[in-house]
Image (cartoon, rainbow, N blue to C red):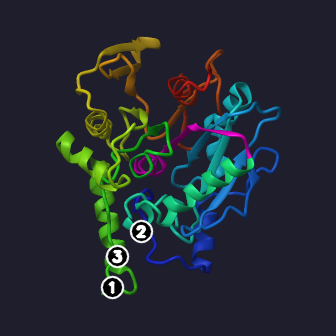
Amino acid sequence: MNFLVMVTGARTKGLILTCVLMAAGLHAVNADTLMRVDDFGDNPGEIGMYIHVPDNMPARAPLVVSLHGCRQDAATYADAGWNVLAEEWKFYVLYPEQSIRNNPYACWNWFAAADTQRGEGEAASIMAMIETMRERYDIDEHRIFVEGLSAGAYMTAVLLAAYPDVFAGGATNAGGPAYCAVTERHFWDPFGWWYLYTGNLNARRCMRGLDLLPEDWGERVRQHAPDGYNGPWPIISIWHGNADDRVKPGNLDELVDQWTYIHGIDRIFDDYVALGPEGRFMHSEYQDDHGIVRVETWQIEGMSHGTAITGEPGERCGRTRDYILDAGICAARRIGRFWGLDD
């Protein structure tokens, strides 16, 4: 079974889930790197909160919310490089952490209606964490960003759609469009078996790639945004390896369709450049009428499912793990520059 889409029918503890945790290789958070926060208000999604706070923080610093992928936790995904950049550029990092009580492979339930609607489930818990950060630290409310990998990337797109009034920008690594799947649980399904089956089926369809019109994707965003919301909409950086066999690379194009529609710009890129050895890093920009880049894409030649890092001088960011891949380019650093975190 593909671990990206496996869900549980209910949030229950048990020995079998403990065994899954051990099998998935998840481990305790390194206290020297991340700090656990237990008291962050309402937590309907029953998830964990970890943060990285650099020393000597300036006033009105940005906040980056970083969502791990399946078979990962906050500590493993911290190796994607955001802590390194936080120390260099001075911003806060928030790492929500999925629980195996919700999903046995620690995937975010990005395809479940109960966890992706504004004010509900896992999405609501993440918003409670952001509000706690704003209460306890001097954070610029206009510079809050979210990014994620795989299931975390799908959830990132969902959060940008449901909370455009919170986020200035986002980034997806090996993900797909917001609300590609919205699986409901019905009253006649008390044990959740039908919910489990349809959730997995719907998610797999998304991962293989659904080819919808831009207006169809865009209206899914508008339907889940606050009532009457007309913008501004978050900017987005979209990353995908063209050798990804878990989440098909065509999902990048569907994300472009969705977010260019939302920004009211065309789907013809305004700038394109192929960087790196043999032009492996293909970068496109989509600008509004004022020449501001609202959507950008990065396609990485030969990269499989994961997020890109590198140890190259000037691009240094994280360290390799499963799904954190040395591709010769630092996604976090490039995304941070796109968001203006290096200003």
- Give the x, y percent position of residue 215: 19, 42
Residue at image location 63% in from the left, 72% down from the top: 18
How far apart are labels 3 and 1 at the CA level?
7 Å
- Choose the circle earlier in sequence order: 1 or 2: 2
The residue that disc 3 covers is 185
Res 50 seen here: yes
Instruction: From the top left corner, tell me how far across and down residue 147 is, in percent.
Output: 51, 41
Q: Nearer the viewer, residue 173 or 19?
A: 173
Packing grade of label 3 (10 A; few <14, some 14-19, many >=20) is: some
Location of residue 148 in the rendering, given as x and y in whole percent from the top left corner: 51, 44
Label at residue 324: none
**Residue designated by label 1:** 187
Image quarter of the N terminus: bottom left
Q: For residue 139: magenta? A: yes
Mark 2 → mark 3, Cα distance in angstroms: 8 Å
Tell me if residue 335 is in the magenta stretch.
Answer: no
Q: Amino acid at mark 2?
A: Ala
Q: Is residue 210 left or right of residue 156?
A: left
Residue 267 in the image: state x and y as whole percent: 23, 27
Location of residue 23 by image quarter: bottom right
Task: Classify 10 Å Cα crowding around label 1: few (below 14), some (14-19), many (20 and above).
Answer: few
Task: Confirm or deny contact between disc 2 and disc 3 (CB under 8 A).
Answer: yes
Can you say whether 174 is above or below 227 in the image?
Answer: above
Crowd band around label 2 with a 10 angstrom C-alpha radius: few (<14), some (14–19), many (20+): many
Q: Which residue is mark 2?
A: 114
Q: Secondary structure at mark 2?
A: helix
| Residue depicted at x 26% and y 32% | 264
What segment carries the magenta color? 137-159
Q: Is residue 321 visible?
A: no
The residue located at (60%, 80%) in the rendering is 14
